[in-house]
Amino acid sequence: MTTAQTQELDVQPTPLALLLLGREADPRSERGVECPGDLPSPSDPDLVARARAAKEKLGDKVFVLGHHYQRDEVIQFADVTGDSFKLARDAAARPEAEYIVFCGVHFMAESADILTSDEQKVVLPDLAAGCSMADMATAEQVAECWDVLTEAGIAEQVVPVSYMNSSADIKAFTGKHGGTICTSSNAKRALDWAFEQGEKVLFLPDQHLGRNTAVRDMGMTLEDCVLYNPHKPNGGLTAEELRAAKMILWRGHCSVHGRFSLDSVNDVRERIPGVNVLVHPECKHEVVAAADYVGSTEYIIKALEAAPAGSKWAIGTELNLVRRLANRFAAEDKEIVFLDKTVCFCSTMNRIDLPHLVWTLESLAEGTLVNRIEVDKETEAFAKLALERMLALP
């Protein structure tokens, strides 16, 4: 259909279309879409030099955090690299830094703001760098879920455990209702603690990490777990199903890790005899069950560091990290491949590119604060309470 025909029909773009085009914001979502100011062209040959100059001008006033899933062009400017929680704690350990530039996604920058001092300003180079998993659980949906649990007569028995990959609102809900936060590294410890406090757990927002931890690490059965779907009345569950369950899993997942399949595992074993399959616990249960090793991003890195020369590995996690590890260990004759044949970058994480980083650093160097991420005080207080419970885990 031509533009003229469209105009004749008086077709108006829907709010969703405008959101996807970056022309509108969704106030109920963790994602942002606006990035005021002019970005340098991605073809600008001076971008690296400009980033270095701006960072040098800022000196100790800026501290750049780089998540493992960032592109190489961005990660080269990170003062520290790591997973989301490690980076938030690293930021809190640098109180002299006025600006914390978080090269990651929105919920990570929120966590950094919660854990840093009021004097520090957390900046996200592109506000559209969100997280599909975090967006799968909104404050309104979780409040409605709690009403469903209350009506079923089990809310007092339920302890919420929320994955680090959640919005500040969800962390605050967790803190307010006596729960804790977990990472992919300490999910079992968090669940052990939660079952000491109550009889059931509401696990938010990643169903796969919750299921894998409960079944693989804690000896529960798949029948002990039910899946709460926020898009269905009463979560698609009966009161009897909720009362019988130990783990109430939220219907959320990682768009990257959720793509790996059992076929991916079987295919790579056929293609590469003797390969070790190492996957993240955000993968589906059947993928985790078929893998040789399962662990967090930090676990994956350490496992490859300790692997013998000549060993072969298929990694089920984000492609930027897998490619970086393959290059890093090539000299040690370690063959490292991506688990799936399909290229699988984290699309929102990849929104943090060199033009956005240059624009951010140059703006800060000129005294202009851009893209600040700031959590309101009430939300911060309850979210921090949940994070502190995690830090106190044995």
Image (cartoon, grey):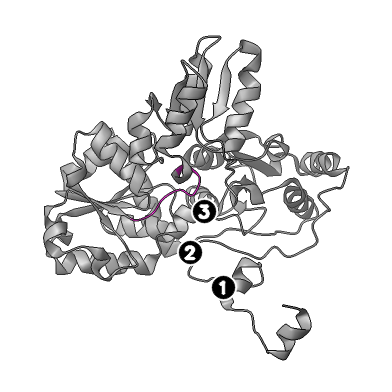
Q: Which residue is mark 1?
A: 16
Q: Which residue is mark 3?
A: 131
Q: Say what secondary structure mark 1 lies in.
A: helix
Q: Which amino acid, by three-letter code, is at mark 1?
A: Leu
Q: Is residue 340 above or below residue 29?
A: above
Q: Name the outermost residue toward the top.
A: 309
Percent of width and height locating residue 194 = 22, 44
Quadrant position of the N terminus in the picture: bottom right
Q: Say what secondary structure mark 3 lies in.
A: loop
Label 1, residues with CA under 10 Å away: few <14, some 14-19, many ≥20: few
Residue at (73%, 48%) from the top-left corner? 357
Label 1, label 2: how far apart the Cα atoms are:
27 Å
Q: Earlier in the sequence, mark 1 or mark 2?
A: 1
Mark 1, mark 3: which one is toward the viewer? 1
205 left or right, relative to 75:
left
Mark 1, mark 2: which one is toward the viewer? 1
Q: Which amino acid, by three-letter code, is at mark 2?
A: Asp
Tell me which corner region of the image, top left, top right, bottom left or bottom right, holds residue 82. Answer: top right
Percent of width and height locating residue 366 = 81, 55
Label 1, label 3: how far apart the Cα atoms are:
17 Å
Residue at (59%, 43%) from the top-left corner? 345
Q: Are marks 1 and 2 in contact (CB under 8 Å)?
A: no
Span colored in magenta: 251-257
Res. 302 visible in picture: no
Tell me which corner region of the image, top left, top right, bottom left or bottom right, holds residue 338. Answer: top right
Percent of width and height locating residue 47 = 83, 44
Q: Which residue is mark 2?
A: 376
Label 2, residues with CA under 10 Å away: few <14, some 14-19, many ≥20: few
Q: Are marks 2 and 3 in contact (CB under 8 Å)?
A: no
Q: Is residue 43 above or below residue 237?
A: above
Q: Which amino acid, by three-letter code, is at mark 3?
A: Cys
